[in-house]
Amino acid sequence: MWSMKLKVKVKDNPFTNYSELYNSRVFLYTHNYYAENKKYHFLVQGVVEKPKGFSSFVKKNEYVDYIKQNGVFFVCKYSFPEKSKRVPSIIAAFNTKFMFITPITYEGGWEWWEVAALKREDLTKLLDTCMKTGISETKLFHIKRYSPGSILVYEMFPKLTEKQEMAFRLAVDKNYYNYPRGITLSKLAELMKVSVSTYQFHLARAESKLMQVLRKKSDFSDKK
């Protein structure tokens, strides 16, 4: 089996543009497509790091037909005419011969792919298609033999309450976990408009849930 890692910059992609403008990664975990009424319709499901205003931003794109957002999670459908130059590269990427090793990731204005296939030539065909149709820039990192490693599934992450998620995201966004710290707990509490003790409670609960996941992942890795 072979794997390929590359990044592409696609014109007018709302996920790419959002990642660059708002410094927020976007992850696509499931994706599919179908043909109907002389159009290709693409269905995706994903997660956005900074969800505020995300759906409003994405739905402004002329190709987006539908988006439904619930917190950091979203489902989106976008469509292109069957003769659009964008279609071949997307269909090539969504080929059932490929297995996405990691979610499709949008970060810093780039779309990152890491895919695997049984035959090396299938990956090189995908690369050729990307370079020829509808993508402004493509950068290849590697094509190499693939051996299965760890699997990251977002649904394995703990279920945080709205206030726990808000407290944790605020701490991350304001560089609380940097060294030295970029902000104090009292200032974070002020931004969230709660007392310091209340903010500290929500943050501690979020951290505890997240640490349990990391501990399980560490235990799994130790057993391999």
Image (cartoon, helix red, strand yellow):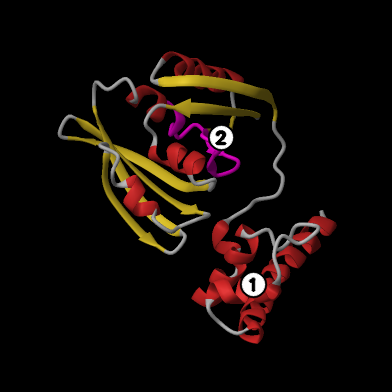
Residue in view at x 45 percent, y 19 percent: 136
For label 1, the residue is 187
Image quadrant in which you'd find residue 116: top right
Judge the density around disc 2: few (<14), some (14-19), many (≥20) Cα neighbours within 10 Å. many
Residue 133 placement (x, y as % from top left): 40, 17
Q: Is mark 1 on a helix, strand or loop?
A: helix
What residue is pinned by disc 2? 112
| SS for callout 2 | strand
Residue at 28% of width from left, 43% of height from top?
60
Kind of residue at disc 2 = Trp
* Magenta-drawn segment: 92-110
Residue 100 placed where, x, y %? 55, 39
Asked whether residue 84 appears in the rendered view, the answer is yes
Q: Which of marks 1 and 2 is nearer the N terminus?
A: 2
Left-right relation of 96 to 118: left
- The image shows residue 68, relative to residue 26, as above or below, that is below
| Residue 102 part of the magenta-drawn span | yes
Badge 1 crowding class, 10 Å Cα cut-off, few under 14, some 14 to 19, many 20 or more, is few
Q: Position of residue 154 (x, y in %)?
A: 56, 58
Q: Is 128 left or right of 32, judged from the image as shown?
A: right
Q: Where is residue 43 in the image (x, y as percent from the top left)?
A: 34, 45
